[in-house]
Image: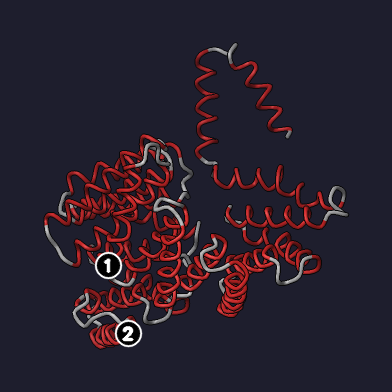
Amino acid sequence: AKSLETRRDESLTLGRAPAQERARRLDELRGLLRRTNLTDTARDFMHTVMLSPAQTARTTLFRDQPDVESALKQSLAITYYRQGMPALAEAPQTDALNIREKTLGRGDARTLESLDWSARVLAGRSAEAEDRKRAEATMRQALDARKALLGEKDPGTIFAMRGLGDLLFLQGKLEEALHVYEQALALSKASQPPTSDSVLFSALRLATVLSQKGEPARAVAELAPIRDALRAMKDPDPATQIRVLQNLALAQAQAARITPSPAANEAAERTAREALELSASFHGDEHPTTFIVRDNLAALLLRNGKLQEARPLWEKSVQLGRRSLSPSDPTLLRALNDLGQAMIAAGDATNAAPLIAEAELGYRAGPGIEDRDTQDVVISHARLLLKLGKPGEAIPRLEEVLAQRNASFGGSDIGTIDAARELGRALALARRFADAAAAFTKAEAAIGGTKRPLTSAARWG
């Protein structure tokens, strides 16, 4: 507070300061803002100023109103959860469930809502397999009770169904998640308009799983009609349109890789360009969503051999990121890595090296090696080191990533297989042929666990 008072007092005199002094102070302010993680700042502000006081209000205002108290607690828990703070959601969520069980009983729809959210919070705050297994059991219990009480087509039932699908997907249970999302989408289409949130979110979740399973054509078939329906609306929500276009472009790009053709590539590019144009006009160039859409388009252009069109997009992301984001922001780090990859594709591996090394250091200092994005960048740096003739520096990095992915996702995860393949290549380049052969053999054997066809890109690689 004292710091804010000081800044306010200084700002009152800024207009009377000489031009050179004003410029110096404004540069200092810009530097402070660049080093500020605005997302975390907003979350901290919300927690300190709004949510924490509301959490304690029950002791004074709602002592004799359990229905109001439980509704407040439930809203607090949901807000914390959706702001990415599941640990802070736990206390109000526990209170809400306890109050509703005591005053309403397990058969009330509001109690079932709290039971479902308790499972979501547990799964969100803990990555332990046992906790997620317990959360899944609770979700199934709440979902069955909702179906019996409210019916399958009730929006709350469908919402709970998607939550179960999300948890199954998080645990790598793709077949089960696919079945749940298909059911949620069918029920949504039968009871709600084609552009309703229920249809939209169910279709997006289903498309994600289909793409993960190597069935992007089905994902395109689900998302394209929603895109067309949104286009036909008089005043569609731009954020919703961007999300649909973004996911549709990714599915179209994957479908084009499986069945290559100029028309398929062009369709994916066209959708990605539309998403970028809409995001830039609605959110602005420096919004996180615009960064992601721009980088996705650049990656697609690079895959299609259009390096001269892709590289300026990544250069723009790096330029904007250095100006408006903190040095550890994943959006900037991803842009640094991607620009480095574009430079490698142009034959400039030497100048790409510092960009990718910077990205790796930032990811390690931020999300950490347990994070999958960090692991992807470490693999990216290892590939560059191999290109530069430094397998001795690449091998420890790949071994570290492979150990992490084996522990987190298992040997049959496609990301684990990719890391094992890269390690085998590095070992071969280091002339450790027996070790390389063992790594390749293990990776190929693991592909059977993914239920992918014998001719899949993973096995061919």
Nearest the camera: 190 or 44? 190
Classify mark 2: helix, strand or loop: helix
Question: Alpha-carbon neighbours of circle 2 within 10 Å: few (<14), some, or many (≥20)?
Answer: many
Of the image marks 1 and 2, the number of the one nearer the N terminus: 1
Residue in the image at 45% along x and 52% along y: 196
Nearest the camera: 456 or 213? 213
Nearest the camera: 47 or 266? 266
3D distance between C-alphas at marks 1 and 2: 28 Å
Amino acid beneath label 1: Lys
Residue 146 in percent (x, y) is at 60, 69
Residue corresponding to mark 2: 446
Amino acid beneath label 2: Ala
Question: Alpha-carbon neighbours of circle 1 within 10 Å: few (<14), some, or many (≥20)?
Answer: some
As drawn, which residue projects farthest toward the left? 262
Establish if 387 lies above or below 343: below
120 left or right, relative to 314: right
Residue 259 in percent (x, y) is at 16, 66
Establish if 59 lies above or below 87: above
Classify mark 1: helix, strand or loop: loop
Residue 413 in percent (x, y) is at 37, 77
